[in-house]
Image (tube, grey):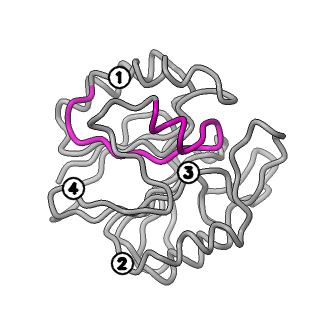
Amino acid sequence: MKVLAFSDLHGSSKHAAALVAASADADLVIGAGDFCNMRQGLDEAMTLLSGISVPFVTVPGNAENFDELRAAAPAHVEVLHGTGTTVNNLRLFGLGYGVPTTPFGAWSCDLTEDQAEAQLKVCESTDILILHSPPKGVADLTSTGQSVGSLAIHSAIERIQPGLAICGHIHDSWGTHGQIGDTNVHNLGPFINWFEVDK
């Protein structure tokens, strides 16, 4: 299966147009959160992506919450948050929001490590783990070299060992990747990222 994945669109019409065009060659599109900015412009962001007609699975970032994203997303878009789904026999599980809690203030949709751990516990097995936040120690460095990823997410990846874990959130680590056991972890950014997944 040919999977197109991205994160952190933040309302960019330029990146949205490129993603919509590329989606014509995809079997599945995954959006790993932060479609808008500071809880503003979500409807407009989803309209920019409305040309995606293949199966489209998302998680909320810290810039929008689960209910807001479900309300703004077209009917064929599936929104995951502590939940899973299956697309053409490919198992997907998603967890959105900023983990751990961010310093950004009241607008940011965040989870504590304990809250994230509780939501991830229900996932026993999946092919792709869709996250907004990266795991601690992998694809999670800020421009100052600080590791700000999630311990709960790292532990879940170690336990579940999906073939692929995708995330965003930390802009300075867009385009970086690493391994946790047998799992490939990729911090995506608002770019065209292709993955071939056997199913």
Alpha-carbon span between mark 4 and mark 1: 23 Å
Kindly state the secondary structure of the residue where label 1 is placed.
helix
Q: How crowded is mark 4: few (under 14 residues within 10 Å), some or many (20 or more)?
A: few
Residue 75, percent from left and from top: 30, 34
Quarter of the rendering occupied by the N terminus: bottom left
Q: Which residue: 40% across, 32% down?
A: 73
The answer to which of marks 2 and 1 sits earlier in the sequence is: 1
8 or 87, nearer to the observer:
87
Q: Give the magenta range.
A: 52-71
Alpha-carbon span between mark 4 and mark 3: 20 Å
Residue 108, percent from left and from top: 73, 41
Mark 3 or 1: in front is 3
Q: Label 1 is placed on what type of residue?
A: Ala
Q: Which residue: 66% across, 56% down?
A: 140
Kindly state the secondary structure of the residue where label 4 is placed.
strand
Q: Label 3 is placed on what type of residue?
A: His
Vertical position of residue 29 compared to residue 87: above or below: above
83 or 113, nearer to the observer:
83
Residue 42, percent from left and from top: 54, 25
Look at mark 3 in the image and give the residue it sits on: 132
Look at mark 1 in the image and give the residue it sits on: 18
Look at mark 4 in the image and give the residue it sits on: 87
Kindly state the secondary structure of the residue where label 2 is placed.
loop
Q: How crowded is mark 3: few (under 14 residues within 10 Å), some or many (20 or more)?
A: many
Quarter of the rendering occupied by the C terminus: bottom left
Alpha-carbon span between mark 2 and mark 1: 32 Å
